Image (cartoon, grey):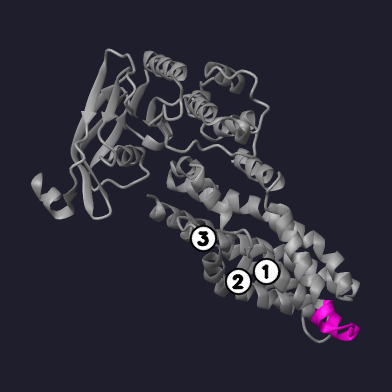
């Protein structure tokens, strides 16, 4: 399985925040996106997830035979917000996403195992809103574990996490990559990986016309 | 998708949920009418079906704006949108159904109690319940379109109501006229009731598609 982006550009309002982005990821590889605030890291991730339309270019997932796969069905997107309901118990939240996002390939941990994997054993019965910000973020990470999807798109995944949890997160990503997954993360946290590609967004906004002409 | 239905029902019935809010509003609107109109029993029983319908319509509009906004605020909407077109339409359909079960169905069940306040006969109350049972889902389905259009607006509640109201007027007209036809002798009950059912089915088919299109367009 490979993830291929070609000549991607994305806009925010009337300016082009990034342009001519291209990369190829194979199984077990990760891409780390860095850049100053407002450089378009989140926009790029949302374009990759299919939540925003790309101005130009395309992003594809291909299986081992080269056939296109639906990006939305094979991708976990973890945005700034945790996608959990405060009113519901942690285990209910995770069980819902497990059932809603169950991939074709099945797999994934059970809800209890996922909560344990983020080292929060015993919080399953609490309403999500009772948890601290860091615990909530870790439960949001646990969502990626309850249903197996090969590509993870992570937007500042370690926000609100302490040092120990940073390490926990790095271990989770390593485990995911070792299992043949791929990850694209906007983070300044060193993942401690060997096979990591880097993409630096410069944050230089271009007007739409100038940007599109530049690489036409 | 059953999981989505269960989740939305659980949220609506837990603390701070919208389920009780609609019924309480319905109760408040209808309960003050006899005090305002005065104890003219004939007048009350004559305007009863219309008052119940207006109360139910307003109560259904209440909280409709939260249908997608709550999911947008906590990021769930991103995951719900990461589906193919059919999946998204089905998601909207299921969420609309959950919204009706949580807010529309309690209104139908509360109608007989409020019928007593309006001095309505048993037959009249039954007719209102039946028309509400058919009509309130239509409000939920078409309301989903308004909720999807206004999803990105921080205070879109009133806007949703105003967007929806013109489309909800036919539901009100045929709902009320069918309710009256059941008790006034020469008027036939079935034609307005059939048109009401047709509107409900039409909105059930159109609403989720239009709302899904609006959600796709609103993504940012």
Q: Circle 2 — which element?
A: helix
Marked residue nearer the N-terminal end (2 or 3):
3
Q: Which mark is nearer the camera, 3 or 1?
A: 3
Q: Is residue A77 left or right of residue A118?
A: left
CB contact under 8 Å: marks 3 and 1 = no
Classed neighbour count for the residue bearing mark 2: other residues with Cα under 10 Å, few (<14), some (14–19), many (≥20): many
Q: Is residue B15 above or below residue B107?
A: above
Marked residue nearer the N-terminal end (1 or 2):
1
Chain bearing mark 2: B
Q: CA distance from mark 3 to mark 1?
A: 20 Å
> Which residue is painted at 56% across and 30% down in the image?
A132
Q: Circle 1 — which element?
A: helix
Marked residue nearer the N-terminal end (3 or 1):
1
Chain bearing mark 3: B
Residue A120, position as x, y percentages in the image: 58, 20
Name the main secondary structure of what is drawn in magenta. helix
Residue B190, position as x, y percentages in the image: 74, 75
> Which residue is painted at 64% across and 32% down in the image?
A92
Q: CA distance from mark 2 to mark 3?
A: 21 Å
Q: CA distance from mark 1 to mark 2?
A: 8 Å
Q: Which mark is nearer the camera, 1 or 2?
A: 1
Residue A149, position as x, y percentages in the image: 43, 26
CB contact under 8 Å: marks 1 and 2 = yes
| Quadrant for the N terminus of chain A in the image | top left
Q: Is residue A3 visible?
A: no
Q: Is residue B7 visible?
A: yes
> Which residue is painted at 36% across and 38% down in the image?
A49
Q: Is residue A65 above or below residue B109?
A: above
User: What's the magenta region?
Assistant: B34-48
Which residue position is annotated with label 3? B155
């Amino acid at each position: 399985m490979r993830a291929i982006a070609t000549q991607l550009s994305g806009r925010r309002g009337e300016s082009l925040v990034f342009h001519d982005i291209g990369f190829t990821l194979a199984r077990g590889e990760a891409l780390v996106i860095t850049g100053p605030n407002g450089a378009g890291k989140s926009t790029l991730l949302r374009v990759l997830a299919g939540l925003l339309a790309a101005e130009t270019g395309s992003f594809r997932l291909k299986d081992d035979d080269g056939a296109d796969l639906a990006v939305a069905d094979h991708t976990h997107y973890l945005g700034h917000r945790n996608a959990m309901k405060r009113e519901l118990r942690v285990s209910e939240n995770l069980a819902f996403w497990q059932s809603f996002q169950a991939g074709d390939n099945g797999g994934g941990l059970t809800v209890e195992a996922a909560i344990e994997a983020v080292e929060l054993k015993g919080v399953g019965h609490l309403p999500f809103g009772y948890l601290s910000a860091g615990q909530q973020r870790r439960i949001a990470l646990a969502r990626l574990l309850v249903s197996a999807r090969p590509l993870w798109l992570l937007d500042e995944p370690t926000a609100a996490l302490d040092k120990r949890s940073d390490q926990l997160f790095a271990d989770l990503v390593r485990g995911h990559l070792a299992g043949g997954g791929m990850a694209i993360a906007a983070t300044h946290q060193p993942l401690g990986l060997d096979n990591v590609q880097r993409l630096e967004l410069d944050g230089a906004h271009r007007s739409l016309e100038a940007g599109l002409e530049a690489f036409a | 998708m059953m999981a989505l239905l269960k989740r939305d029902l659980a949220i609506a019935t837990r603390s701070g949920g919208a389920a009780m809010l609609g019924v309480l509003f319905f109760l408040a609107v209808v309960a003050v009418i006899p005090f305002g109109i005065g104890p003219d029993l004939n007048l009350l029983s004559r305007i009863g079906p219309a008052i119940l319908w207006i109360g139910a319509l307003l109560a259904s509009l209440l909280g409709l704006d939260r249908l997608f906004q709550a999911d947008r605020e906590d990021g769930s909407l991103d995951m719900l949108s990461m589906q193919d077109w059919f999946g998204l339409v089905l998601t909207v359909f299921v969420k609309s159904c959950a919204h009706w079960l949580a807010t529309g169905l309690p209104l139908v069940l509360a109608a007989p109690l409020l019928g007593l306040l309006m001095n309505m006969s048993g037959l009249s109350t039954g007719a209102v319940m039946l028309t509400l049972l058919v009509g309130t889902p239509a409000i939920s389905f078409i309301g989903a379109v308004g909720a999807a259009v206004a999803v990105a607006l921080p205070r879109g509640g009133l806007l949703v109501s105003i967007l929806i109201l013109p489309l909800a007027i036919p539901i009100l007209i045929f709902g009320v006229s069918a309710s009256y036809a059941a008790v006034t002798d020469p008027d036939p009950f079935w034609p307005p009731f059939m048109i009401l059912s047709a509107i409900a089915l039409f909105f059930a088919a159109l609403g989720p598609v239009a709302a899904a299109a609006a959600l796709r367009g609103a993504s940012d």
